[in-house]
Image (spheres, rainbow, N blue to C red):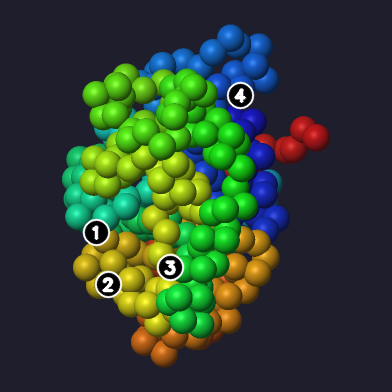
Amino acid sequence: DELAGRLATIDALSGGRFGWNVVTTAGGVVPANFGRDGEPDHSARYQRASEVTARVIAAWAGQEGAEVTLRSPQGRPVVVQAGASKDGVRLAGEHAEVIFTAAQTLDEALAFRRSIDENAAAFGRRPEHVAILPGLSTVVGSTEAEAQERRQLLADLVPEPYALGRLSAQLGIDLSGVDLNETVPLDALPVPEQASGSQTFYRLVLGIIERQRPTYRQLLRTLGGGAGHRIVVGTPEQIADDIEHWFRAGAADGFHVMPDALPCGFGHFVDHVIPELQRRGLFRTEYSGHTLRDHLGLPVQAPLRSAPPILAPTW
């Protein structure tokens, strides 16, 4: 109830521009913050996430006995989730209104959308009220050659020991002694369900290995700029082509954009890609509403009472 109150308070104070990203864990070091020696197993994490999220939503709807002190124009915060494992998709179908995905191919993205729609419908929800935002890392250049040169420069700036350590942590596998010029062996990798790290990221990496059969060095380069998300390199027109293709195919309602470097990469996207999308009628030229739900095209989730219950902050 305290969590529900704090989140709803932020939502009300922001004028309805707040969303809650439900994340089950952020790596092996996190449990130490709570006096634990390690993470719960994957299914246990998602079971707990489902229970906590259900209770928070119930509190917002006035079902937990909390007093109403503030009101939000969007009814309640937008619930966001990311996860492509079986447990993650179930949690998304049960509660999420915005879903991040790290799909690398159009076929993967379309299959993910079908699984989300099926799970949402199974929980009595309307699939069209769920927005899917694939992650997209962009490298923009005035020419394709310029964009490829920038991509190479940024990849060369990432220290290989750091990149390898990060990959080890994300996969839950010790890679400290590998030969970077060796082809990544498929038979040395456990099935995703047995991975101790993020199953979503693990499946993403496994797909890259199966399709490309890279060396460890090539894999690190592929993953580098987008932290595992899909990377599109090219001119503003080429990047807009890619975005339009995914959107019109039904694989995306929008994108979780992660420019290659900040702040300049974001400026390149805003100054050059956005105008191209606007010329194609794919991006707004002005806002039609004021809340996060308005911007995402999601309906107001009216609570059971006239306003979401909010507990008095304790800080």
Q: Earlier in the sequence, mark 4 or mark 2?
A: 4
CB under 8 Å between callouts 2 and 1? Answer: yes
- 2 vs 3, front mark: 3
| SS at circle 3 | strand
Of 92 and 313, which appears nearest the observer? 92
The x and y percentages for residue 157 are 62, 52
Q: Residues within 10 Å of mark 1 (few under 14, many from 20)?
A: some
Asked if the residue at tag 1 contacts the one at tag 3, i.e. Cβ–Cβ closer than 8 Å, the answer is no
Disc sitting over residue 233 in the figure: 3
Image location of residue 308, percent across then percent down: 56, 47
The answer to whether the residue labelled 4 contacts the one labelled 2, judged by CB atoms less than 8 Å apart, is no
Q: Residue at x 42, y 59 (%)?
A: 231
Tell me if I can see residue 169 in this picture.
Answer: yes
Mark in front: 3 vs 1 = 3
Which element is circle 1 on? helix
User: Quick one: label 4 or label 1, which is nearer the N terminus?
Assistant: 4
Q: Which residue, given by chain and number where applicable, does mark 2 sit on?
A: 245
Three-letter code for the amino acid on which mark 4 is drawn: Val
**Gap in angstroms between the C-alphas marked 4 and 1:** 33 Å
